[in-house]
Amino acid sequence: MSFFNAYYSEDFEDKLFVEEIIKRWNQGDNEFYIYTSGTTGKPKQITLTRKLLKWSATSTLNKLNLTRHKIMCCLPVQKTGGFMQLIRALIWECDIHFFKPSNDPLDSIGEHDFTTISLTPTQFKSSLLKFPEQLNKFRHILIGGAPSSNSSSFNSKLNHPQIWLTYGMTETASHIAMQNLTNNETVLNPLLGVKISQKETLQIHIPELNIQLQTNDIAEFREGGFVILGRSDDVINSGGIKIHPHQIETVIESLFQMMKLQKKFYVSKENHPEYGEIPILIVEGEPDFNQKYFIETLTPLLPKYHTPKKILFTPKIRNTETGKVIREGY
């Protein structure tokens, strides 16, 4: 007997898609199709096998050690994050409630008894700022991508949920490594059965599924796990020094928090006649802070030559449907 049930908010727009996937899953279909996020170009279609989907959902269940589940889904269900929440609910045989994706997913849910939620870094930061009490009711919060803030910034507000940073890609159906931020883990740890290595960029091998993938990500191995430095195509080659934007962004976010500034930003690169490329900081909104003071304070916090050489302001930073920043070169 299955205890799976799907519920929908009034403004949820993909009910027909969800019902079609449920139908195909229950009739035993072996292949499902999903699209990549489109961070670096046009989204492409990926085929996911039933075996891979079952492996992924079961691996997550074992990692979280869950006994009771009720999933809140507020990610696009036709992309990996939302799609896998539906698959988990089917395999875990639990309730799932679908909400229209937004940057403030907890805005209108009120009292709830959801146990598990997956969020983008943007959704997590917004919810932590505006709805910490609602966020604190979950048992597990999975964050896809890399949140820049230090775990101490939310551990003081959230004492109930386990917060996980996850790493994966569409081709692996979901995450293949997890990092418990609540327990102050400093590295991503591969799930059972996953082997990782690096040849220029990170390689993922899942022998049980006969999967061997070469990613575009550059990793650093330490303490039995790894950290993602960034994508190879985002690397800034400045005078022979390779600069990874994510490492700079982590420090910048901490400085903005110290200055009590809520800013959306990213680090990009600009061509330079002498150095080849230089790092620049793109900030959404108006230039309403002391830029000279900001750069002077930031410089000693970063490795030599890593400080952005200029700050540009834009009315709107573009994101993919799944909340990932679209880095534009200048």
Image (spheres, grey):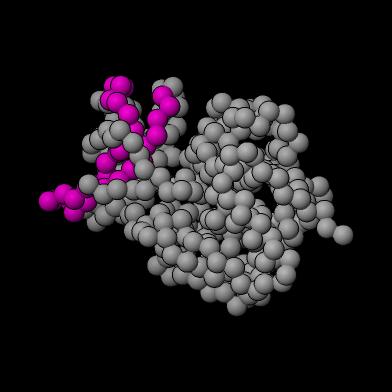
Q: Percent from the top left, x then y, of residue 46?
A: 50, 68
Nearer to us in this view, 69 or 128:
69
Q: Is residue 121 above or below residue 274?
A: above
Q: Percent from the top left, x then y, of residue 135?
A: 65, 33
Nearer to us in this view, 180 or 119:
119
Residue 256 occupies quadrant: top left
Q: What residue sits 55% from the left and 66% below the top?
A: 33
Q: Residue furthest right?
A: 1
Q: What residue sits 43% from the left and 34% below the top?
A: 253
Q: Residue furthest bottom?
A: 210
Query: Magenta segment range?
Result: 261-290
Q: What residue sits 63% from the left and 38% below the top?
A: 10
Q: What residue sits 67% from the left and 72% below the top?
A: 29
Residue 277 covered by magenta stretch = yes
Q: Percent from the top left, x then y, of residue 87?
A: 67, 59
Nearer to us in this view, 227 or 304:
227
